Image (spheres, grey):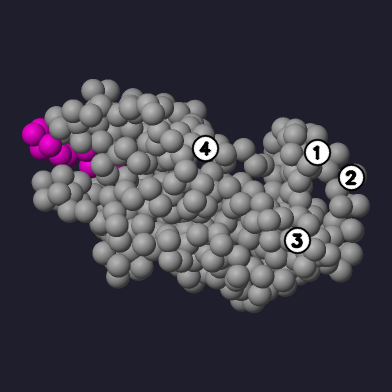
Amino acid sequence: MSSVKIIHVIPYIGSEYGGPPYVAKSLNDLFNEKGFKSIILTVGEEYKKAEIVSFKLSSKTFWFSFNFMLRSNRYIKNCDIVFVHGLYSFVSLWSSLIAFIFGKKIFLLPHGMLDKHSINSSNFIKNMERKIFLYSFGYFQAKISKRIIFNSKKEQTNSTFNKNSIVIPNGVDLGAIERVKCDEELFNNDKVKLFYLGRINPIKGVELIIDAIDNLEDDIRNKIELVIAGSGRGEYVRYIQNKSEKSIVRFVGHIDEHKKYCYLRQCDIYLQPSFTEGLSISMLEALACRVNMITTNRVGLYEELIYNDAAEVINYDKNELKTAIEKLIIRKINHSSNGYKIIRDKYNWDIIFQEYKQII
């Protein structure tokens, strides 16, 4: 396998961009560990790692890079397989085109960007822009790909252009998570500790959390602390902050690497009431940290969570979220061990690698 050369293409790899960079970096590391030759092509910030090649960014609009257009071709020409992560960027579109011209094997990982709920999650103009792109350039990228790789059956079923596709789930490095040491107390230990981790975006259900907490009875509200970790568009973040009860809700911004695992380990209840979600990395990390979780039946893992009694799964509804919070606090139900078993047995990278090995 050492002769097989692999490229992962993604416009950004900073952890503030959520799941796609995590998946690209994890797969890149995994392929290298297993004897392949794998690198990442990206734009923007420079990285010291030899396996990450970064090109100068010309504009964040469409993630355009003149430098990438001129210099990335030789990397693609000399590889065997190109994994294209995401859509709606010059980087992914140009890489697909050049890989097609050179006759390379292309795999497209949309990371939820083909999901119909995601396509229609913004205002009318933004939604139309997405649709115009998808039914022109996006269709071309889907058509020339050997496979479209969805991260869950839910994402595959609910996505545009789901023919010629397969499902390979995302995973986590369970060993690395368990080796993290946590010396700092991150919550008020006199409170029931609630935690949200992810983008502060309307489709993530953050506003639903705030509304549910506002509706709790005072005796429950006075017992809880909610920490919200993540970043988002300034205007929307300010709206959520202004809507939140300052004595209950604390915003800590973007947190990186080890610290997020410490928050997850120390919280009593992890909240992920998404309006739409594929196989969320934050959710997998939470389960790996043995959390008690509340999520919705709009996430990619919800059927397994119900079947294994691994979380409270609700409709996307603030009253149901309120009831689930009360249930976990008052009745002290614990799903954490069952959630951990799901990760151990199915959603860690060593197991998932076998599925990637089969397709390449």
Distance between the Cα atoms at labels 2 and 1?
A: 8 Å
Comparing labels 2 and 3, the label whose residue is closer to the camera: 3
Q: Residue 257 in the image: x percent, y percent?
A: 52, 37
Give the residue type that dot 1 points to.
Phe
For disc 2, the marked residue is 71
Q: Does residue 315 appear anywhere in the picture?
A: no
Q: Tag count in the figure?
A: 4
Secondary structure beneath label 3: loop
For disc 4, the marked residue is 257
Name the magenta segment's main secondary structure. helix
Q: Is residue 282 above or below residue 161?
A: above
Distance between the Cα atoms at labels 1 and 3?
A: 23 Å
- Disc marking residue 205: none
For disc 1, the marked residue is 55
- The residue sitting at 57% across, 56% down in the picture is 111
Query: Which quadrant holds the N terminus?
Result: bottom right
Secondary structure beneath label 4: helix
Q: Which of pointers 4 and 3 lies earlier in the amino acid sequence? A: 3
Alpha-carbon neighbours of circle 1 within 10 Å: few (<14), some, or many (≥20)? many
Secondary structure beneath label 2: helix
Distance between the Cα atoms at labels 4 and 3?
A: 25 Å
Q: Which of pointers 2 and 4 lies earlier in the amino acid sequence? A: 2
Give the residue type that dot 3 points to.
Phe
Distance between the Cα atoms at labels 2 and 3?
A: 23 Å
Distance between the Cα atoms at labels 1 and 4?
A: 24 Å
Q: Which of pointers 2 and 3 lies earlier in the amino acid sequence? A: 3
Q: Residue furthest top?
A: 247
Query: Mark 2–mark 4 contact, CB under 8 Å?
Result: no
Magenta region: 209-220
